[in-house]
Image: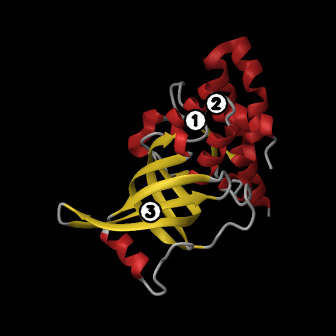
Amino acid sequence: MIPMKKRLTLAATALVIGLGLSAQAATSNGNDFALYYHEANTPDKKSAVLKDAEGRPHFFRYLKILEMTEGDEGGKHYVDVMAVEPASSMNVKLRISATNSLALLKNSPETKVGDAIAVTGKVNSVDTAKNTIVLDSSIVRHKDVLSRKPGKELLSEVDPTALFYSYTEGPRPIMLQAQDKDLLESRDKILEQGGSKAWFEFLETEIAKRKAQRAAERQAR
């Protein structure tokens, strides 16, 4: 489990793919986003986490449905869902209108309040007064199980290759996997001494070294 202090530091910088790559960004982990937003302890830190995530797709697992409301708009059927994300205890509000997603909810056994679903949706906003993350363009990926332990089973904690951090201020985007998160320990010192150029060069060099080392280790097995 990542220490609290490091979590907040990461939350205030960047957790996932940068906004500049939104058109080609991979889907980020929504459970991580919810947890880091929840644990950011100042308005500025919360704003930084939200700014990095806005408009990009995030994959949420273990969403326990609290409310389901069906309706029609413009001749199109929809289901509004209010769910809770277990690691952060934040609410997640979404509208499901895609045909395949609606059919998945109806599949036997039909999804009901109290069940869990996994969804992908673009982060639209966070209603701080209601402790609610608002999603757009939501798609139901599969029926899910309820999380076993709050704060556990997040992608970056169980998958060493999961995207953990991104740096997009250099000539090329740098993507850091969870297994290389120790490199972030040098961030503040390098930025202070050499600025963004030095940080970019450090990350690119170290990541290349580690990729080569891992490739050599795989070949030696």
Is residue 23 visible in the rendered image? The answer is yes
Residue appearing at x 57%, y 30% in the figure: 48
**Label 3: how many Cα within 10 Å (few below 14, some 14–19, many 20+):** some
Q: Position of residue 115 (x, y in %)?
A: 56, 74
Residue placed furthest toward the left: 75
Name the front one of labels 2 and 3.
Answer: 3
Residue 49: numbered disc: 1
Q: Is residue 6 above or below residue 31?
A: above
User: Could you tell me how far apart the alpha carbons at marks 2 and 1 are, in whole angstroms?
Assistant: 6 Å
Instruction: Decide: few, some or many residues near mark 2? Use Cα within 10 Å; few <14, some 14-19, many ≥20.
Output: many
For residue 24, side relative to residue 167 (left or right)? left
Q: x, y percentage for residue 162?
A: 64, 52
Task: Assess disc 1: are there few (<14), some (14-19) or many (≥20) residues with their C-alpha within 10 Å of its C-alpha.
Answer: many
State how far apart marks 2 and 3 are (Cα): 29 Å
Going by the numbered disc 1, the residue's amino acid type is Val
Percent position of residue 30, x then y: 56, 52
Q: Is residue 209 above or below residue 220?
A: above
Looking at the image, which is closer to me, 17 or 146? 146
Q: Earlier in the sequence, mark 2 or mark 3?
A: 2
- Going by the numbered disc 3, the residue's amino acid type is Val
Badge 2 vs badge 1, beta-carbon distance below 8 Å:
yes
What element does badge 1 sit on?
A: helix
Identify the colour scheme used. Answer: secondary structure
Q: What label does residue 12 carry, if any?
A: 2
Q: Earlier in the sequence, mark 2 or mark 1?
A: 2
